[in-house]
Amino acid sequence: MTVPSVTPLQVRCALLLQDEIALLDVRHEAAFATGHPLFAANMQAERIALEAEMRLPRTDVPIVLYDAGEGLVPQAADRLAALGYTNVRQLDGGLQAWQAAGYELFQDVNSYAKAFGELVEQRRHTPSLPADEVANLIADKANIAVLDVRRFDEYVTMNIPGSVSVPGAELVLRAGRIAPDPETTIIVNCAGRTRSIIGTQSLINAGVANKVMALRNGTIGWTLANQRLEHGADRRGGIGLFEGAQTNAREVAYRAGVRHLSVTEAGALAAQTNRTLYRFDVRDALDYAAGHVAGFRHYPGGQLVQEIDMAAPVRGARILLTDDRSVRADMTASWLAQMGFETCVLEGGYDGALEVGPPVILPKPDLLQRYRRPYEGTDVDARAMQAYLDWEYGLVDQLRRDGTHGFSVI
């Protein structure tokens, strides 16, 4: 089939106007990570049949495909057409034309979430401590609580000694149980920078009485400082709201422009078939499996913010979140709204019949096709870790040069 084309300028205009567009890089993830437009999402040509229905819920959404000269676009377009997608075009000249037009290329994966995190730190002056200072506090048995906001499997692989696993969106829900003493300093860590910045700022935004600091540069910074990591830990934080958390979380969401919808109002939103709507249940997997509102895909809130390009590749789409305790949805929604998504939270919905069963999880690509993140595993070269941090430090300047982000930090 002949695939109609659009110019890099037309794509850029759609992004600036916040029109709906799915700009898809159809190369392998490892190639995607070498450079791509800010709001591009990776969908390998051979995985389209596996991923498209979940990641592109509206079949007439504007889709623009590109590669870097590998000839993958016609194959990808054929596969999308076979699935019923009707508005598929290719980027005229591919990735080389984007770069030749003077537009920015961003490295790595989840790039715009990471760039957003750096912008949050710059604008909110999110406090942090270097690894050596945190290690000294641990050695001195200071009144601190180290909360690890990564996925639990990442935490088990390696963690800061004595830390407790509290994946991202669970922070505001569980911090009051882990650190009930307002004199306890809470230190938030991830593998690198983004999730610890967002986690720390989440607790600050939600008004926790404790002093809250990020572990600067996460487990990467810890490793580069020659500090010891634990392996195989199994400490998880129980539920415990600090005073005013629920009200404060809702206020944060309100300030970010998030709307709360009743079940009826959410139904009216879903009925508008000319717009893409993503529906996510942002609770943990056990809560989801025990009973969830029909039509909502499981995506834990902290990972959703980090991996929004993977979860919702249609830039300009709407997002509806649900959570039976509301706190996780409100905090997650507040970040997605600041990232430029029209974001709503479902009020209620748990009184009727719920679906039961585990989340649907897409299998990961072949290891040879995946990008090895510099914060994965325990055998990463120190130079690679430092280069990754240096790249993150430069993201705010790159956002400024690119000029399409539309982020608004409250």
Image: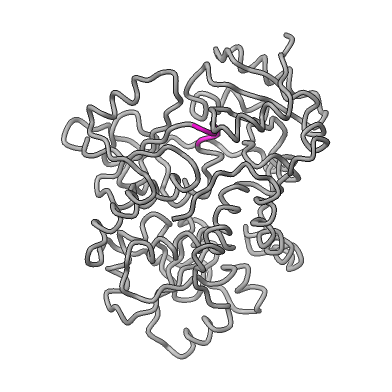
Quadrant in which the C terminus is drawn: bottom left
Q: Position of residue 222 (x, y in %)?
A: 60, 74
Q: Position of residue 361 (x, y in %)?
A: 47, 37
What residue sits 56% from the left and 40% below the top?
309
Quadrant in which the N terminus is drawn: top right
- Left or right of 33? Residue 39 is left
Toward the bottom, the furthest residue is 140
What residue sits 68% from the left and 49% below the top?
108
What residue sits 64% from the left and 73% below the top?
223
- Left or right of 157? Residue 31 is right
Q: Position of residue 274 (x, y in %)?
A: 44, 18
Residue 314 lies within the magenta run:
yes
In front of the other: 156 or 113: 113
The dominant secondary structure in magenta is loop
Is 281 placed above or below 225 here?
above
Q: Start and end of the magenta stretch? A: 312-316
Toward the top, the furthest residue is 1
Is 60 placed above or below 17 here?
above
Residue 330 lies within the magenta run:
no
What residue sits 50% from the left and 46% below the top?
339
Q: Position of residue 237 (x, y in %)?
A: 34, 64
Is 114 placed above or below 257 here?
below
In front of the other: 77 or 244: 244
* Image coloring type: one colour
Rendered image quadrant of residue 80:
top right
How many numbered marks, from 0 up? Answer: 0
In front of the other: 278 or 49: 278
